[in-house]
Amino acid sequence: MKAFIQQHATALIIIGIIAAGIAAYANALPNEMFFDDSQGITDNAYIKDWKYLPNLFSESLTSGSGFVSSYWRPLLLIIYSAEWHLWGNSPVGFHAVNIFFHLASATLVFFLLRRLFQKIGPAAIAALLFAIHPVQTEAVTYVSGLGDPLSLFLMLLGTYGFVALRSKWKYAAILALFVLALMTKERSVVFPGMLLLADLFMWRTRDFSLVPFWQFVKQSALRITPFALLSGVYLYLRHTVLLNISEGTPNMPLEYLASAATRALTFLSVLPDYFSFIFAPIGLHMERSFGIEIPTSFFEPMVLLGTVITLALGGLGIWAWKKHPAYTFGVLWFFIMMFPVSGILSPVAGILYEHYLYAPIIGIAFIIGLGAYWLYEKIPSRRGRIALLGAGAVLAILLIVQTASQNTYWKDGITFYTETLRYVPQSSKMLNNLGMEYAAAGNFIQAEEAYRSAIHFSPSSPIPLHNLGNLYYETGQLEKAVALYRAAIQVSPKSVLPYMALHRLYRESGETEKAEQVLRDLRLLNGTN
């Protein structure tokens, strides 16, 4: 038996990771699609007909549903389109694709770490933690989260090919994977950093005594330069002709947008939250950025705590470099993969999201795996080692159970928004979206209550005013609808939707002159005749 396990260790580990992942995510398959799923998929006309294929490359992720955004993700839309043509609006297929790419990425995590460090145990633990950790549900269980597992899969595949293949065509293939990743998620721009990190530790663990450091630097620079140049070209295009990426943060606080130093302090202030997600994944939810106060001083408590965490990880990386470089790799991986979502150089659309940890958690998981394996080897008795393995198995089962439980948070729109409001009861966005879900389900009384709460907490937002107006329009309360549409216009004169809704109401009521006046007001707003 022992000989069989040793002979087939790799296959057994992969089977175990996949089985654990399926156990964690199987109950997510029947979950409904909602929230951004409507704009990107269910209401997106572009993915439902291949004649719109050119539009997927020239317009934003949500243009096909009538909403313009700064997200240029053509490969993601192509995948959605292929899925739509295969199984239509059925959520099971969409969830299955997310889970497939997540578990494929977990498998590549194992192969990459084992290839770099020849440590099968720590690599297996890291891949397993990556696969079953509850914090991953925001990227895996949420259909619109596909960009994270898909882009990471492409980058891990490229990184593994970079360190494992010897073919003369490998650079062309890896560049192609990089292009596909950039067409999936903006944060894929970090790919050259992944390659540099892998190259550094291939040298550190294999050729350290054979190739002088500066010779390695020269060789590595030549290998990485094409990818760095491609990254630079992409960033230039994304800030010019491809849906200016900097326009994706219109609702962020002005002080956050204005200063890189402030964004650095903000990142330090939320870093403790990220570690709480990893080591205490309880009470996970999506509306994390709501109510976050932008720090103004380095000496604020959460900023100082984030600094302590950063220094502790940095100290571990420096200490481990000579004798235990795998720990250094874990530290560097975490910070390199966190950098695009830190907002330091370029503001991000949300200060704190759980799915921002999707790729960075691999570094922390690897450190945990290295520590656990070191402890296992230090235990002299067979009974002690079995006890440690048993404790690890229990922890894995608890994580699987917690992940399966977290999947129910994403069951349907009403469940999702109701549960989120337990944590952020004053979130106008969540209340407005809950109202939309109730209205779609025909629960008009609950919808009205949700919309009125949203208006109460955000009186300057036209969205809940407009949606409540729509509710009154649908239920025949036209005078109330007119009042709400005009209120939406008053708080936000540049919002087009209330004008169009008001024009529709007047036209259908036979009040032609009023309908034409609304159009004239709208043309005046747009500066047209």
Image (spheres, helix red, strand yellow):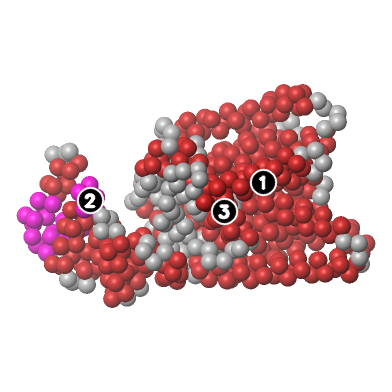
Give the SS element for disc 1. Answer: helix
Q: Which residues are magenta?
A: 491-518
The image's mark for residue 272 is 3
Horizontal arrangement in the rendering, residue 18 relative to residue 388 (left or right): left
- Which of the image's four quarters has the C terminus? top left
Mark 2 = which residue?
A: 492
Can see residue 260?
yes
Magenta segment: does it hold 84? no
Give the SS element for disc 3. Answer: helix
Can see residue 61?
no
Question: Local crowd at mark 3 within 10 Å, few (<14), some, or many (≥20)?
Answer: many
Q: Is residue 196 above or below residue 248?
A: above
Please name the amino acid that badge 3 sits on: Pro
Residue found 68% across the figure and 35% down from its top: 196
Horizontal arrangement in the rendering, residue 333 relative to residue 72 (left or right): right
Main secondary structure type of the part rendered in magenta: helix
Residue found 42% across the figure and 64% down from its top: 424
Q: CA distance from mark 2 to mark 3?
A: 37 Å
- Which of the image's four quarters has the N terminus? bottom right
Given residues 358 and 184, the one toward you in this image is 358
Mark 1 = which residue?
A: 313
Mark nearer the viewer, 2 or 3: 3
Q: CA distance from mark 1 to mark 3?
A: 13 Å
Magenta segment: does it hold 505? yes
Horizontal arrangement in the rendering, residue 376 relative to residue 398 (left or right): right
